[in-house]
Amino acid sequence: MANLIKKSIVAGLLLGTSSMASAATTSAGGIEWDTIDIGGVQGTTASIQFQQWFSDGSYGLGTDGQETITSTSKESVGLGSGGFLTGVGVFTGFSDGRNAFSPTFCQNGPGQCELTIAFGGLLAIGTNEFDSSNAWLNVYYDDTPDFGFSTNANSHEDFAEAQDGTLWASFEFSSFDFDGNGFESGSTDAYLNIVDGLTDVIDVFETGTLRDIFFTASAQFNGDQYTNNSTGEITTVSAPATLGLFGLALLGLGAASRKRTAE
């Protein structure tokens, strides 16, 4: 999934460069970003870095009722069937040329906030196959950054810092398509549906369907139980006509076609 998330976010950024006509400024939940006009549809794109691993699925329950990573589920159980793909990460960009090293999407100025993610519940049930029926991905806003602006080999140890902000948005997976080399590496495409979060954020991303955002990512375990420096892309799905452009964006981003590495 780490690979999946990684490519999803990159795809979103590329989308912004394809057929760009005009941009509008949007703000919600403490951040501000530019949207891209693609074929008459305003779209949002974002990029992330994350680390993922397989856990035993011992998740906790947050104050808003969402599932969370705990001191138990931050431990790796090794690759393979029966494990739950789990991870933490941070947004490095949010639409149209934002600076990944100094997140200017913060309304209070560069470096004055962070958007972090935590995900889990993707059950490995066979080679290259996952059950996403109970999978989730949460986004948190924090105006006192403590997770960091990138991930590293020990990001899983900072699972609490990745989840100590305000719940910005909570998503469930409505689909998860994984194309991989066993569980060592691969790429993923997924659609996610927003189910909770701040009211103004929900208003931005809710489409009335189960496909509110398109997510692609890729990653490799490289013989370890935790990935490192995985990246992904997210794009909004406002209209079916934009899906073809999403795919083109992924190709242009160097994601080498629409392959996402869910691991």
Image: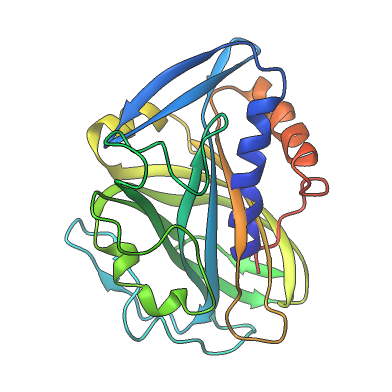
Which corner quadrant holds the C terminus?
A: bottom right
Say how many tags the image has: 0
Residue with the most extreme bottom position: 77
State the colouring used for the structure image. rainbow
Q: Residue at x 47, y 32 (%)?
A: 209
Say if residue 190 shows up in the picture. Answer: no
Tell me where residue 105 appears, x and y as whole percent: 40, 36
Tell me where residue 163 appears, x and y as whole percent: 30, 63
Tell me where residue 208 appears, x and y as whole percent: 42, 28
Which corner quadrant holds the N terminus?
A: bottom right
Say if residue 89 shows up in the picture. Answer: yes
Tell me where residue 112 appears, x and y as whole percent: 29, 46
Q: Residue at x 39, y 56 (%)?
A: 116
Q: Residue at x 66, y 24 (%)?
A: 242
Q: Quadrant of residue 245?
A: top right
Q: In this rendered view, identify the residue nearer to me: 216 or 207.
A: 216
Q: In this rendered view, identify the residue nearer to me: 85 or 12.
A: 12
Q: Is residue 260 left or right of residue 82?
A: right
Q: In this rendered view, identify the residue nearer to me: 158 or 54.
A: 158
Q: Is residue 29 left or right of residue 237?
A: left
Q: Quadrant of residue 20?
A: top right
Q: Residue at x 52, y 35 (%)?
A: 98
Residue with the most extreme left position: 63
Compared to 26, does 125 lie above or below? below
Compared to 114, does 183 lie above or below? below
Compared to 73, does 230 lie above or below? above
